[in-house]
Amino acid sequence: MLPQIGREDCLATHMKAYEAQQNHIEQVLEALLSQMPSVSPVTGNPPTEVAPPTVSSAGEPHIPPPPRYNRDPQDCRRFLTHCLIQFEF
């Protein structure tokens, strides 16, 4: 374990390095922000709301429900595939 004075020195060194990194990040951010074009607020009418598109149920395919599972291991994959297709539509 480090003696108390050694820990304080180590902590002070790390804090100085942290502050230097924060200052550098702040300078880079300010430089980037100064390069961005300024945006003026838009005046005029607010945008009108657009109604969501209506979905026609006539074009949707009708998929019959899967046949009842008969607990046969050979039919398990087929049954699960039918269920997956049913849920995706």
Image (tube, rainbow, N blue to C red):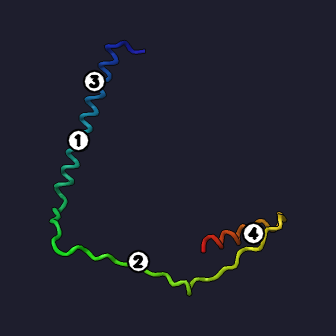
- The reply to whether callout 4 and callout 3 are in contact (CB within 8 Å) is no
Q: Residues within 10 Å of mark 4 (few under 14, many from 20)?
A: some
Nearer to us: label 3 or label 2: 2
In the rendered structure, the answer to whether residue 49 lies left or right of residue 39 reads right
Residue 5 in picture, x, y percent from top left: 31, 13
Mark 4 or mark 1, earlier in chain:
1
Residue at which label 1 appears:
24
Mark 2 or mark 4, earlier in chain:
2
Residue 12: which numbered mark, if any?
Answer: 3
Q: Amino acid at mark 3?
A: Ala
Give the distance between the C-alpha atoms of the residues marked 3 and 1, in whole angstroms.
18 Å
Query: SS for tag 2?
Result: loop
Residue at which label 2 appears:
52
Q: Amino acid at mark 4?
A: Phe
In the rendered structure, the answer to whether residue 52 lies left or right of residue 84 reads left
Q: Which residue is pictured at 27% across the width and 31% down the height?
A: 17
Residue at which label 4 appears:
79
Query: SS for tag 3?
Result: helix
Nearer to us: label 4 or label 3: 4
Residue 89: which numbered mark, if any?
Answer: none
Q: Residues within 10 Å of mark 2 (few under 14, many from 20)?
A: few
Quarter of the view holding residue 16: top left
Nearer to us: label 4 or label 1: 4
Mark 1 or mark 2, earlier in chain:
1
Q: Amino acid at mark 1?
A: His
Mark 3 or mark 1, earlier in chain:
3
Mark 3 or mark 2, earlier in chain:
3
Farthest residue, direction bottom = 58
